[in-house]
Image: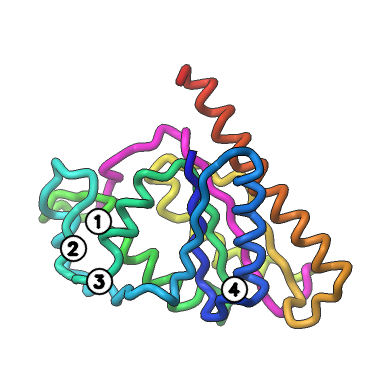
Amino acid sequence: MKILGFMGSPRTKGLCAQFTESALKGAASRGAEVKQFNLVKYKIKYCRGCHSCVYKNHELPIGICPIKDDMAGILEEYLAADGYVMACPVYDFTVTSIMKAFIERRFPLFYKQKGLHGKVPDARVKQGFKKKASLIATGDAADEYAAIAEPCFEVMSGHFMIEEIDVVDQLYVGLIHSVDEQRYKEKMQQTFAMGVRLVEEIEKARQQGGQ
């Protein structure tokens, strides 16, 4: 089993990155192979909206994007993985531009007939809810204002509904700039447990599916 973490903060050693790593460590403790993508370190250009990836090559599991950067390789790893941790700070009530660029460039995972308007593109490969995901968002607003992270969670998980991937957990960590030692320890334990639970839910889905 392989779990991938996609981290959308520009700070690769910040708390959002540490929480992502903690969740992956939790998954690893259950025997999963893990890998963290600190997205700011990758060459991911903005989507141009040409729709070439969704209109053509419908026989392929991943459409062909004309933009040459790191996304083709990332998508291959994404499709081969069994579960995901998506983590991002809340910037202006939504995800960072780093995470948004990555999400938009996942478009080759979908297909649509050219000229067919009014329909949502469908997933090239349906996962049958055997793959799972967990979401982490961080922000300066206190936990009592956790609703501020809902748009962030919606953006990070929007494609999962079409791909048939369940979200197991979502966690908002507020007051991110004033986390004391005790609260840091609690959140690291909480995110570690998220990773454990992610693997357990994937295993449960496989057993129920007879795999």
Q: Amino acid type of disc 2?
A: Cys
Is there CB contact under 8 Å for labels 3 and 1? no
Above or below, 66 relative to 162: below
Task: Give the quadrant of the C terminus.
Answer: top left
* Disc 2 + disc 4, Cβ < 8 Å: no
Dots 1 and 2: beta carbons under 8 Å? yes
Comes first in the chain, label 2 or label 4: 2
Q: Is residue 8 left or right of residue 29?
A: left
User: CA separation, marks 3 and 4?
Assistant: 24 Å
Q: Residues within 10 Å of mark 2 (few under 14, many from 20)?
A: many
Question: Where 148 sits versus 108, above or below?
Answer: below
Query: Label 1 vs label 4: CA separation?
Result: 25 Å
Q: Which residue is mark 4?
A: 89
**What is the span of residues highlighted in magenta in the rendered image?**
119-143
Q: Describe the element under mark 2 as helix, strand or loop.
A: loop
Q: Secondary structure at mark 4?
A: strand
Most foreground residue, 81 or 58: 81
Q: Residues within 10 Å of mark 4 (few under 14, many from 20)?
A: many
Task: Say which mark, if any, is on residue 91.
Answer: none
When the figure is inspected, residue 32 is found, relative to residue 110, above or below; the finding is above
Write down the residue under mark 3. Answer: 69
Q: Horizontal and vertical percent for residue 17? A: 60, 69
